[in-house]
């Protein structure tokens, strides 16, 4: 009889499988925005509300220690997978479960496209955190991420370019694609752009930036986003669990 070796599913496979069954919500926590203990409490509330993963990252980080402390505090309070959302090789943490190994495809700076990855790859290998391949593009208004990432922003009405990047990411073998409007964006990714990208690719589509209301979250999910990311919303809410519950049930439809 043939030997069947059962291996544990990777986090990427889990996201892939779960996102085929329903729309997902990921919570983004920026270690620069609150103390680690508070980040831990926020992660617990997000888990209780039904969020599927905690992403950790930000554009204004100052040290790896900051990321380590934030991740450790989150792991203490929640069982959700913690996935790094790094702005550079310096901000990786061995305490995380995985890292979005993401190329900022529309950056003018080759560092954000590939060279930071070259620096960070040995750390990923030896720390054992799971790399999750992702194509990442920033659309207007782009906010701090657009400026720090030295990005040629995709115009809000330039659907063709967004679709081109998404297909290129898929053809390069990336497992996920992320349309980002920038944290705190006044205008989130347009529905027409989400719909066109979704129609053209087979890999799961992340959408984030400026999604703060139940209505907007529902709209973006309906337009075709597989995974909705919210960050700022988490920092604004007193009753985070309740607020996220509403958003997540709207996303799930
Ligand atoms: C930023 O897309 C995320 O990378 C989240 O944006 O902070 O506006 O929710 P917000």
Image (spheres, rainbow, N blue to C red):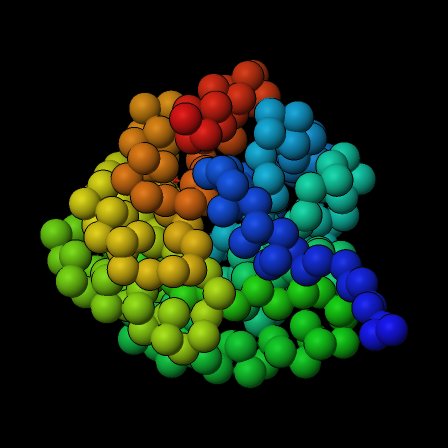
Whole-percent x, y for residue 68 in the image = 72, 55
Of 15 and 245, nearer the camera is 15
Left or right of 183: which side holds 30? right
Of 4 and 145, nearer the camera is 4
Whole-percent x, y for residue 181 in the image = 31, 49
In the picture, which quadrant includes the N terminus?
bottom right
Of 130 and 16, nearer the camera is 16
Left or right of 19: which side holds 63? right
**Observer able to see residue 47:** yes
Q: Quadrant of ligand 1?
A: top left
Would you place residue 76 above or below residue 233 in this image?
below
**Residue for point 49% across, 47% down:** 20
In the picture, which quadrant includes the C terminus?
top left
**Residue for point 48% across, 23% down:** 249
Would you place residue 31 above or below residue 46 in this image?
below
Determine which quarter of the picture holds residue 132. Answer: bottom right
Of 53 and 71, nearer the camera is 53
Left or right of 247: which side holds 81? right
Would you place residue 235 above or below residue 145 in this image?
above
Q: Residue furthest front?
A: 1
**Observer able to see residue 152:** no
**Residue for point 68% across, 60% down:** 10
Number of numbered tags placed on the structure image: 0
Whole-percent x, y for residue 179 in the image = 34, 54
**Residue for point 74% across, 63% down:** 94
Whole-percent x, y for residue 243 in the image = 50, 20
């Amino acid at each position: 009889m043939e030997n069947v070796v059962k291996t544990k599913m990777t986090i990427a496979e889990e996201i892939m499988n779960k996102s085929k069954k329903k729309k997902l919500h990921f919570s983004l926590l920026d270690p620069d925005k609150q103390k680690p203990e508070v980040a831990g409490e926020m992660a617990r509330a997000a888990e209780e509300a039904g969020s599927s993963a905690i992403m950790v990252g930000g554009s204004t980080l100052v040290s790896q220690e900051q990321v380590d402390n934030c991740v450790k505090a989150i792991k203490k309070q929640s069982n959700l997978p913690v996935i790094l959302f790094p702005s550079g090789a310096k901000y990786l943490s061995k305490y995380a479960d995985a890292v979005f190994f993401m190329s900022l495809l529309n950056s003018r700076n080759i560092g954000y496209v590939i060279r930071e990855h070259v620096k960070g790859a040995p750390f990923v290998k030896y720390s054992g955190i799971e790399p999750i391949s992702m194509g990442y593009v920033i659309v207007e208004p782009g906010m701090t991420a657009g400026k720090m990432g030295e990005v040629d922003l995709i115009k809000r009405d330039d659907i063709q370019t967004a679709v081109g990047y998404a297909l290129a990411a898929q053809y390069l073998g990336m497992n996920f694609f992320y349309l980002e409007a920038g944290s705190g964006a006044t205008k989130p990714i347009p529905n027409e752009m989400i719909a066109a990208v979704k129609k053209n690719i087979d890999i799961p589509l992340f959408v984030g930036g400026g999604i703060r209301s139940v209505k907007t979250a529902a709209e973006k999910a309906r337009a075709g986003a597989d995974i909705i990311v919210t960050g700022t919303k988490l920092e604004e809410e007193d009753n985070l669990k309740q607020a996220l519950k509403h958003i997540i049930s709207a996303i799930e439809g």
